[in-house]
Image (cartoon, rainbow, N blue to C red):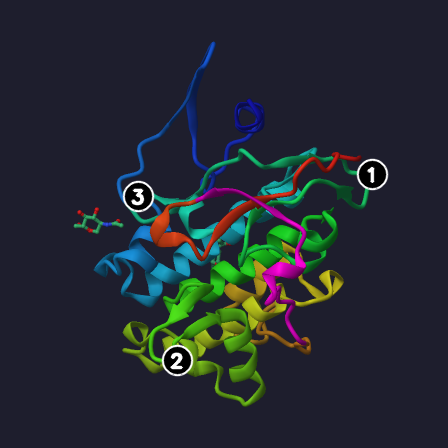
Amino acid sequence: MSELATLSHITHDNLVHLIGGCVDGPRRMLVYEYMDNGNLAQNLLDNKTTLLSSWEVRKGIALGIAAGLAYLHEEIHPRIVHRDIKPTNILLDLDLRPKISDFGLSKFFPDDITHITTRVAGTLGYLAPEYAISGHLTRKLDVYSFGALLLEIVSGKKVVDFDQTLGEQYFLVERAWKLYKSDRLVQLVDPVLMKDDGNVEEAERFLRVALLCLQQKSILRPTMSAALKMMNATTASDEGGGVVVEIMEPGLIGDFMAVKIGRRQQDNKQQSSTTTTTTEGAASVL
Ligand SMILES: *[C@@H]1O[C@H](CO)[C@@H](O)[C@H](O)[C@H]1NC(C)=O
Ligand SMILES: *[C@@H]1O[C@H](CO)[C@@H](O)[C@H](O)[C@H]1NC(C)=O
């Protein structure tokens, strides 16, 4: 019902189009436009299909997701925080245009309030620290999740995964920050995208935007429209071009035990490192 209410009001090229719905006792269905190419997780992370092996395609996907989020955050009233931005919720149409889907957790956000305190729901790896720890919800939660997703899009690696060679869990955000500090961020760019030097430079710029979106302090994260401008600038002298602001340490919930969240469901067995979580019994307070 939440999803129906949200989607019946909005249309945008980068939001999945809801065709209809049915609520008949226990039977509940939402009917969407058909997405020929499935979701981003399947193509980018699980199966590594050749569909996404060019930088132009990855770039188009990143820009489209940013445009969809900027629309939700800044162009409609009331504003909408999606709350569950992650690769499985990004669908790809025949032309590989990205469409944000699954508005089951999204919240309307009245213009005159700065944040909502809510029970924590979402997916580990994409949860901003202030939200995971205290339920403090602002649009900057989606900006953080977008940052994590953008790292995945450019690197082709999962935000949290098990490193077979090191035999331990790794966090992509932490890895990106270490590489950035030692001036080796370019090493994170997916090797399949390295065919052309110009691309590499642009891909590295996207990684810096991702790190900005992931800043520990939510106030240091850009708005989605600002992030879009930084990514889509053709030259550094364009308005908002390049990434001129200083990048500080990103926020990371490395210790999942410190987060007071209960387990709600497992996405599926293969994806157990990205667990969907929710607090138990916490009240929603506006
Ligand atoms: C991977 O691709 C194969 C062949 O295209 C398909 O049958 C399979 O379902 C895909 N797996 C996932 C996880 O998407
Ligand atoms: C990116 O910039 C180009 C050229 O300025 C523009 O045509 C396009 O609409 C922009 N893309 C997005 C997603 O804003």
Q: At 38% from the left edge and 76% from the top edge, which residue is drawn?
A: 167
Q: Are marks 1 and 2 in contact (CB under 8 Å)?
A: no
Tell me which segment is drawn in magenta. Answer: 249-266
The answer to whether residue 252 is above or below residue 91 is below
Placement of the C terminus among the 4 image quadrants: top right
Say what amino acid the circle numbered 1 marks.
Answer: Asp
Q: Is residue 278 magenta?
A: no
The answer to whether residue 146 is above or below residue 79 is below
The answer to whether residue 185 is above or below residue 125 is below
Q: Are marks 3 and 2 in contact (CB under 8 Å)?
A: no
Q: Which residue matches tag 1? A: 112
Say what amino acid the circle numbered 2 marks.
Answer: Leu
Q: At 44% from the left edge and 57% from the top edge, which residue is drawn?
A: 273
Give the x, y percent position of residue 280. 66, 39
3 or 1: mark nearer the eye: 3
Q: Which residue matches tag 3? A: 38
- Residue 147 appears left or right of 202: right
Q: Which residue matches tag 2? A: 166
